[in-house]
Image (cartoon, rainbow, N blue to C red):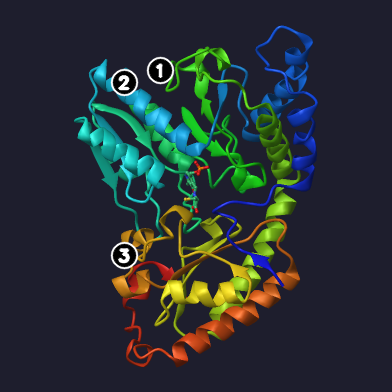
Amino acid sequence: MNVYLDNNATTMVDPAVYEAMIPFFSEVYGNPNSLHRFGTQSHPAITQAINQTYKAIGASDNDDIVFTSCATEANNWVLQSVWIDHILHGDKNHIVTTEIEHPSVLSTCKFLEDQGVKVTYLPVNDQGIVEAHTVKAFITDKTALVSIMWANNETGMIFPIAEIGEVCRQKGVLFHTDGVQAVGKIPVNLQEVHVDFMSMSAHKFHGPKGIGALYIRDSQPLSPLLHGGDQMGGRRSGTLNVPYIVGMGKALELATTDMEAKMSAIRAKRDRLEDALLGTLEDVFTVGDRSNRTPNTILISIRGVEGEGMLWDLNTALIGASTGSACASEDLQANSVMLAIGADNELAHTGIRLSLSRFTTDEEVDYVIDRFTHAVKRLRAISSSYAIVQPTEGGAAAACGIHH
Ligand code: C6P
């Protein structure tokens, strides 16, 4: 049996999404900016995708949604353009973010620090999130932007975005959230929370890779990152990627229709898997209270078992998982999110991220419980260190908010 449990890295394209995209490769292929019918033919499908996207995230008519090549582009765009508009050409000099953002935010912040911007990287608490009062304490009259993810890609922990948005609104500071791991997994309604900018990526919710979007509240000005032919109302130049835009709209519609039922089904499988692993194995810990986690995610630590060794055994059993974010999977560093939460170095080398999707079956969950348990026992049996590595009473596991 092949089991894919790395859905926070990327997802399978839903067959219905693929079907919807096909005509726009070889039948309706005109440039949507052309005035002839080959170009204008695609307009209804683009409009439909835009409407599907607005509806899925609760955007209103005054807001803009601009399609990008990915969330990395959307994150770069917000941070770099706020720097240009409000720091280079304004009187601000400060950005607030967290220690555990995706590298597309953290590396851009490092780049901006090199340009002289002051960046505050807020530490996370033992649940791997930042509370609104902490954000409030670090906002100054020089703060141009707060950028905080909606849900973390490694732990699945959900940040209090409504409260943080309210703090930013009261303080008059722009608020960007990286919504990549939230959109399509948990309800996102931008009429109910105050967010100025939100990044999304279609391949995280069964859409194609290579398409994302930036939501912009109330048509706020934001200098473009890509200058050129003034597509998307001048916000992002470049010929529209019609098949992928159609795919993103369809994927969002599918993910958010009957969302509660879809989420409950995934959550039930995730909880069964988590309970079985925690119930069967000694010295294993999962990160964060699961009532505040995206319903598909488990980050599990296994004392005495290196994450990479575990991945190898799982891969041999045809199970795809990860030690954390896919873009950090080629180094053998400790999991930086676990370290930020307070895990010790040894524990932070043992994290395995299991992320399910609506296509994960009960049979697959049973198979993973069996093979995972087998792999842990095998690796511990050949480990020279496991026998002497024992958790201390109320020690690292409790201190880092890792739940047993
Ligand atoms: N995280 C993971 O394994 P792109 O690649 O641009 O579509 O999405 C980037 C991105 C931005 N923000 C968050 C919170 C993300 O999780 C990701 C992608 C993958 O966790 C690949 S590194």
Q: Identify the residue shown where x is 43% and y is 35%.
A: 75
Whether residue 342 sits left or right of residue 274 in the image: it is left
With respect to residue 401, does 100 lie above or below? Answer: above
Residue type at mark 2?
Answer: Ile
Residue type at mark 3?
Answer: Gly
Residue 372: image x %, image y %?
58, 78
Q: Identify the residue shown where x is 38% and y is 34%.
A: 167
Q: Identify the residue shown where x is 33% and y is 42%.
A: 107
Whether residue 182 sits left or right of residue 39 in the image: it is left
Q: Nearer the viewer, mark 1 or mark 3?
A: 1
Can residue 369 be seen here? yes
Cα–Cα gap, marks 2 and 3: 35 Å
Residue 233: image x %, image y %?
55, 13
Q: Quadrant of residue 385?
A: bottom left
Can residue 173 be seen here? no
Q: Identify the residue shown where x is 63% and y is 51%.
A: 11
Q: Which of the numbered marks, if any, corresponds to residue 342? A: 3
Q: Please tell me which of labels 2 and 3 falls first in the chain.
A: 2
With respect to residue 208, does 67 lie above or below? Answer: above
State the residue in front, 398 or 231: 231
Query: Furthest residue to the front?
Result: 26
Residue 53: image x %, image y %?
65, 30
Please name the residue that numbered disc 1 is placed on.
Answer: 223
Q: Please tell me which of labels 2 and 1 falls first in the chain.
A: 2
Residue type at mark 1?
Answer: Ser
